[in-house]
Image (tube, grey):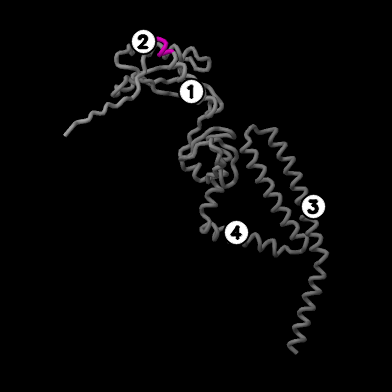
Amino acid sequence: METGKLIQSFQDSWNSFVEQIPSILAAILVIALGIFIANKLTDLSRKFIAGKSTDPLMSNFLIKAIKTVFVIIVIMFGLKVAGLDGIATGVLTAAGASAVILGFAFKDIGENFISGIILSFNRPFNINDTVSIGDIFGRVKSMEFRYTKLKTFDGKDVYIPNSDVIKKPVFNFTEDGYFRMDFMVGIAYENDIDQAKKIILNTMNSHPLSLKDEDREPFVMTDELSVNSVNIKVFFWVAAEDYRRDALMIRSEMIDQVKINLLANGISMPANIQELKWYKE
């Protein structure tokens, strides 16, 4: 008797499944076609956004968000076509409940996601900007939902959680393209300090890439009296898009030329010499 009921139940389930096969196939077809259309609409959105926006980070974020929404709509519609409205409703209900539960379990992931949304609309950098976030220094390569990718100047790819980008100080070295550089020059005590400063300033002003406008003109100052030398600190501004290559190479050229000009004018640059005395017991 029990065996007969079991067989009958199985038969009823099988018949119900067979009856649902056309709807299931239709749902699969709808989902496949919907995803294809979603990809095409995403491509169109990408072209439209690219034409309207000059912000690649914002464009990338919006395109991914649009594609995600399209795919969710397609799946929900496919379940409805298959007559599985209850499942679709259950999925949405479960998703809402799960979001609350998982929100506590994966707080950091949610925090990074929300931070990514905030950064997509308001952030202190763009693609290829040179920035320092915390103790990470590099060039911005991309921004995703959960992290911002930096390429350090020694070739490392660093993925920084977006919540850290929100919370930590961000130093942007290329927002306006101007950098103030500096270096130290040590001259002998017997040399004329004013003469040395004049030679250094003339060197700075003669370099074609040293800025000379009122707000960014070069200047020098006596920094300290060390054991072996009078140390003069040199400040100058440059305009460069590439911090590591352009700005630092200009600084290197400045240092080389300052040394040449000081020595050519009789200004000596003493080495740091320590005198050791030996006392017999």
Q: What stretch is highlighted in magenta?
A: 261-265
Dot 1 and dot 3 residues touching (CB under 8 Å): no
The residues bearing labels 2 and 3 have C-alpha atoms spaced at a distance of 79 Å
Mark in front: 4 vs 1? 1
Residue 77: image tag: none
The residues bearing labels 4 and 1 have C-alpha atoms spaced at a distance of 59 Å
The residues bearing labels 1 and 3 have C-alpha atoms spaced at a distance of 60 Å
In the rendered image, the vertical position of residue 2 relative to residue 269, given as above or below: below
The C terminus lies in quadrant: top left
Dot 4 and dot 2 residues touching (CB under 8 Å): no
Report helix, strand or loop for mark 1.
Answer: helix
Residue 96: image tag: 4
Mark in front: 4 vs 2? 2
Is-magenta flag for residue 114? no
Q: In which quarter of the image is residue 232?
A: top left
In the rendered image, the vertical position of residue 156 relative to residue 11, given as above or below: above
Residue 33: image tag: 3
Mark 2 surroundings within 10 Å by alpha-carbon count, few (fewer than 14), some (14 through 19), many (20 or more)? few
Q: Which numbered disc flags the more N-terminal residue, 2 or 3? A: 3
Amino acid type of disc 2? Gln
Q: Mark 1 points at which residue?
A: 252
Q: Which numbered disc flags the more N-terminal residue, 4 or 2? A: 4
The residues bearing labels 4 and 2 have C-alpha atoms spaced at a distance of 75 Å
- Report the magenta stretch's main SS: helix
Amino acid type of disc 3? Leu
Amino acid type of disc 1? Ser
Residue 240: % across, % down: 54, 24
Residue 262: % across, % down: 40, 13
Residue 41: % across, % down: 75, 44
Dot 4 and dot 3 residues touching (CB under 8 Å): no
Q: Mark 2 points at which residue?
A: 195
